[in-house]
Amino acid sequence: MAQVYLVTGANRGLGKAIVETYLARSDVTVIAAVRDPKASTSKALESLPKGKGSKILLVKIDSSVAGDPAAAIKDIQAAGITHIDTVIANAGISDDFTPVTKVSIDAFQRHMDVNGYGTLYLIQAVDPLLAKSQNPKFVAVGSALGSISGMEQRAQMPSAAYGPSKAVVHWLIRKLHFENPGLTAFCVDPGWVQTDMGYFGAKTFGMEKPPTTVEECVKGMVSVIDSASREKSGGHNLVWDGSEFPW
């Protein structure tokens, strides 16, 4: 049975690189979820190099829109896809770096809508198709900034909007692991990467650029995802380099 991957936030940064990596393999279907399938960056995904027998399907998922994931699943099924093996919940925002005493309610809510609620919408929508996979995996992009027990390791970075939204993601994924014995659910922290989001953070803190390249990060993330099993990875907060960060 051909492997089917669904990647959200697929037309830029890490998402695009993940799509490109899997699409280059033979006999895979990559479902690229984007906010606007008509955008030039989205359409460009269809021209990416493909392995023998592989194909790509664009679907609309705006993580801030509650009904988008369920509507996308209907489109996926209409295209003849009957199962999904791996979901990579990559879409997210991080555009506010203020402390708890200064963060605006609007920024807090915006991050929670996209990162927190968006992940829950996706989990619930893909569940029926993941259940039809022989080895289903749900992978969410996590963050050290969402860690509670490891907070002292990132205490110098104000992230009162982004951090709590990722803490919600962490909780959902860990609980998903315990509630679904047939599913491998875990988080992967990409670290600080040279994407648009990463460069925004670097500029905010007076740095030239983030330390990790997209290529290096995605190579590590894909390796972690490919080798993941419920026994060794399920319910864990992993890092792109294969290490683990506390919840």
Image: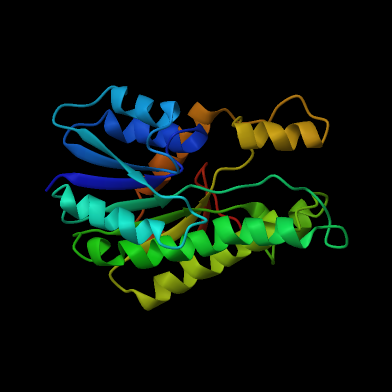
**Left or right placement of residue 29 versus residue 111 in this view:** left
* Looking at the image, residue 198 lies above or below residue 208: below
**Left or right placement of residue 169 versus residue 153 in this view:** left
Look at the image and name its color scheme.
rainbow
Residue 124 on image: x %, y %: 37, 68
Q: Tell how many labels.
A: 0
- Please tell me which residue is depicted at 19% across the width and 56% down the height of the picture: 83
- Please tell me which residue is depicted at 65% across the width and 53% down the height of the picture: 144
Q: Residue furthest front?
A: 38
Q: Is residue 112 visible?
A: yes
- Please tell me which residue is depicted at 74% across the width and 33% down the height of the picture: 202
Quarter of the figure with residue 196: top right
Quarter of the figure with residue 204: top right
Q: Residue furthest bottom?
A: 179
Residue 143 on image: x %, y %: 61, 52
- Please tell me which residue is depicted at 24% across the width and 58% down the height of the picture: 135
49 or 42, which is in the foreground? 42
Quarter of the figure with residue 205: top right
* Looking at the image, residue 42 lies above or below residue 183: above
Residue 174 on image: x %, y %: 48, 69
In which quadrant is the C terminus drawn?
A: bottom right
Residue 103 on image: x %, y %: 81, 58
